[in-house]
Image (cartoon, coloured by chain):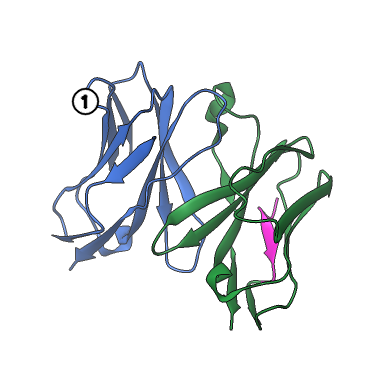
Chain colours: A blue, B green
C-alpha cells in the first residue's frame, strides 16, 4: 500500500540554524510533490511544489529537493526563526489523483 | 477573494445528533475536497468533487457520512447520526485544475472543529 513518512513528529532547533525535514514515500511514482505549512488552529497553506524532473527548488529561505531514486524529498529552512515554528506537511502526487498528505513534522525554533 | 470559507468553526454536539458542515470554495475553482484531521491519522481525504460532481468518495468512513455540492459555490458534509469517534477537524479545500495543470495546489479553509460528546 502507499505510504508517506515524515522523519519525526517533532523537531527542535536553535534560531539561526538550518532545519531539515524529511519526507519518504513508498509505492508512489509522483509526478511532483508539494509542501504545506500548518499553524495551530489553521488550515494548511501551500509553500512549494517540485516536479519529478527538478532536483531542487528554492523560495527565499526555503529549499526543497526531490530524489525519485531514493523516493525522498528534503525540505530545508535556512537561518530559521521562531516564526518558522509550525507543522510542515508533504504530499507526493501522481498525475490527477487527489493529494494525500503525510502526518507532518512539528518544527519548533527556539530563540 | 476571501479564500475558502467554512462554517461553523466549532461545533459541539451529542452523540446521535445530525451535524452539517458547510463550505464555500474560492470562486472559479473547479475542484473541492473534504479532509478530516486527527492526531492519530493525520489528514485523510474523505471525498472530492470536480465541477460539482462527486468523483471519489472511497474515503468516506461510513454511510453515516454524506456530502453534496449543489452548485459551484457551496458544499456540505453531513454526519447522521454522529458518534464520539467522529470528533476531528474537518477541512474543505479547493483548487483550480488538478494533477499536472498548474500543480493543483490546494487552498484550505480554516476548518470546522467537531466534538461529539
Q: What residue appears at the point 54 percent right and 65 percent down from the top-left corner?
A: B89
> Looking at this rendering, what residue extends furthest in the right direction?
B70
Circle 1 residues within 10 Å: few <14, some 14–19, many ≥20: few
User: In the figure, residue B36 lies in which quadrant?
Assistant: bottom right
Relative side of A78 to A47, left or right: left
Q: What residue appears at the point 31 percent right and 32 percent down from the top-left corner?
A: A26
Magenta segment, principal secondary structure?
Answer: loop
Per the rendered image, the range of residues in magenta is B1-8
Placement of the N terminus of chain A among the 4 image quadrants: top left
Relative side of A61 to B115, left or right: left
Relative side of A63 to B78, left or right: left
Q: What residue appears at the point 58 percent right and 47 percent down from the top-left corner?
A: B59
Q: What residue appears at the point 70 percent right and 61 percent down from the top-left corner?
A: B64
Write down the residue under mark 1: A70
Relative side of A36 to A15, left or right: right
Q: Position of residue A13 (x, y in %)?
A: 15, 59
Q: Nearer the viewer, residue B7 or B45?
A: B45
Amino acid at each position: 500500500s502507499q505510504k508517506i513518512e515524515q522523519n519525526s513528529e517533532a523537531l527542535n532547533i536553535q534560531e539561526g540554524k538550518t532545519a531539515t525535514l524529511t519526507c519518504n514515500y513508498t509505492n508512489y511514482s509522483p509526478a511532483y510533490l508539494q509542501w504545506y505549512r500548518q499553524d495551530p488552529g489553521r488550515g494548511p497553506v501551500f509553500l512549494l511544489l517540485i516536479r519529478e524532473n527538478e532536483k531542487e527548488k528554492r523560495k527565499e529561505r526555503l529549499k526543497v529537493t526531490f530524489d525519485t531514486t531514493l523516493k525522498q524529498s528534503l525540505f530545508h529552512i535556512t537561518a530559521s526563526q521562531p516564526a518558522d515554528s509550525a507543522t510542515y506537511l508533504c504530499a507526493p502526487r501522481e498525475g490527477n489523483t487527489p493529494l494525500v498528505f503525510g502526518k507532518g513534522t512539528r518544527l519548533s525554533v527556539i530563540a | 477573494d476571501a479564500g475558502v470559507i467554512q462554517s461553523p468553526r466549532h461545533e459541539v454536539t451529542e452523540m446521535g445528533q445530525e451535524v452539517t458542515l458547510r463550505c464555500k470554495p474560492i470562486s472559479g475553482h473547479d475542484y473541492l475536497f473534504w479532509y478530516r484531521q486527527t492526531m492519530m491519522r493525520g489528514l485523510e481525504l474523505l471525498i472530492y468533487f470536480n465541477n460539482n460532481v462527486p468523483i471519489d468518495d472511497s474515503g468516506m468512513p461510513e454511510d453515516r457520512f454524506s456530502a453534496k455540492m449543489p452548485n459551484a459555490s457551496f458544499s456540505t458534509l453531513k454526519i447522521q447520526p454522529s458518534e464520539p469517534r467522529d470528533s476531528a477537524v474537518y477541512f474543505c479545500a479547493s483548487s483550480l485544475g488538478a494533477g499536472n495543470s498548474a500543480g493543483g495546489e490546494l487552498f484550505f479553509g480554516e476548518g470546522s472543529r467537531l466534538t461529539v460528546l
